[in-house]
Amino acid sequence: MDFRYGINDRPNIGAMFLYGIQWLMISIPVVLTSTFVAPPGETLFFTQKLFAIMGVTMIVNSLWGHRMPMIAGPAAVLLMGVLAATQQGAGVSVIYPSVLIGGVIITLIAVLGLMRRVQRLFTPRIVVAIVVLISFTMAKPIVGMIFSDKDNQLLALVVALFMVIAMAMANNMLRGVWKSMVVIVAMVLGSIVYYCIVGFPTTFISDTVVPNFLIDSVELDAGVVLSFIFCYIALFINQVGSVQSLGDFVGVDNMDKRQSRGMIVQGVMNMVSGAFGVIGPVDYSLSPGVVASTGCASRYTVIPAAVVMIALAFMPDVVSVLLTIPQPIMGVVLLYLMATQIAAGLHMMHTSSAVATFKDGLVLAIPIMFTVILSFAPQSAMNAVPSLLRPIVGNGFVMGIIIIMLLEHLFLKDKR
């Protein structure tokens, strides 16, 4: 594909501004849809910290890391780790040190040159399973968000049906810059329609407790740490796949070096995120679509968007306005994003021939079913699990990874 600007080209100021706005419009929803895991009373400051960390990650990666134009956002796999740990009673002092430890591990893998060896463990079926399991694990919190307004649950259901279909149609019909802005436009229009029906808010979100800049205490729980290590296995795959897909698309060289540097940046920034008490970043795989729609592959175009994101971290009033998006609308957007995740997994399954036999399908189906069951399992059942294993067994995503790894490499190993 011929690009208006190559990977190392520097567009003029006007073009940089326009391309930067597009990256920003895609990056903001990525952050906002992750704020539902904020500690009680700290949503505003939690969001500010997320904006700052994601902005710094994008700048460092574009200038030093993989040196490509990519969006960094809170990792969905870590969202699930936080949700599962919270449901098991773990607090900030337990969860985010585990995030920091995960960042240390993937940094060491990259620094020590172990990435290729680790990648050999992940067959196409395992990669497809991880992509799909993310969506199934998010089903429970999405249900909670869509039906959070107990007085308007029927309205939320109707809005969800119409919005998801409309977003899918728009994604199919639109081209260029508009295709990339489907999510942000849906959030804005959906919020306006929803508030026109139920009434507009008279107050904005503000923190009800004095938030902490850094985590103020550290408690290590072996079960939670191990659970997050499995989440970081998925983050590792996500990062490698995102960088590889964009690298292949724009035709860059030195991919091994770019992969290693990009992983180091993500590892270090996950360590920083753990210290700050927020979700760690990962590069998003939608970046090739943005590059294709704009015809601009310049790595410098993400810098204006990243600078604005960092600036937002120091503008609590603006962030407070952004957080007025109704929870049901945020849930619908997450529903659509998770549907696209499943679609990506199914497409990957087809292109990689990951499922050629009934046995191949069973290797995928069993962990998916266990993930769904464990995600909706009653708390009384989880309380019966030994406390050391509870953070692992109670995390449907982690158990799904464990099960498919056992099936793929041990119990149903492909003899070919």
Image: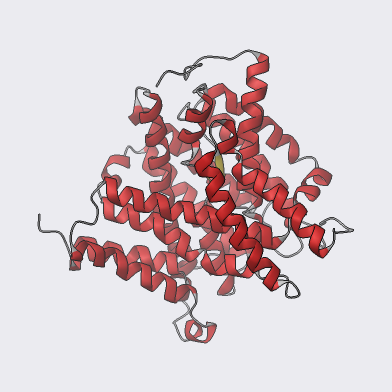
| Residue 328: percent from left, percent from top | 68, 63
The structure's colour scheme is secondary structure
Question: Quick check: can you spot residue 245?
Answer: yes
Question: Quick check: can you spot residue 389?
Answer: no
The image quarter containing residue 304 is top right
Q: Residue 232 or 205: which is nearer the viewer?
A: 205
Q: Residue at x 43, y 32 (%)?
A: 261
Identify the image quadrant of the N terminus.
top left
Q: Residue furthest left?
A: 416
| Residue 68: percent from left, percent from top | 48, 27
Residue 176 appears left or right of 258: right
Q: Residue at x 43, y 39 (%)?
A: 263
| Residue 67: percent from left, percent from top | 48, 26
The image quarter containing residue 119 is top left
Count all numbered tags in the image, as a single digit: 0
* Vertical relation: 241 (above or below) 359: above
Residue 257 appears left or right of 391: left
| Residue 222: percent from left, percent from top | 46, 67
The image quarter containing residue 227 is bottom left
Residue 236 appears left or right of 81: left
Residue 160 appears left or right of 115: right
Q: Residue at x 46, y 76 (%)?
A: 390
* Vertical relation: 131 (above or below) 394: above
Q: Residue at x 89, y 58 (%)?
A: 202
Identify the image quadrant of the C terminus.
bottom left
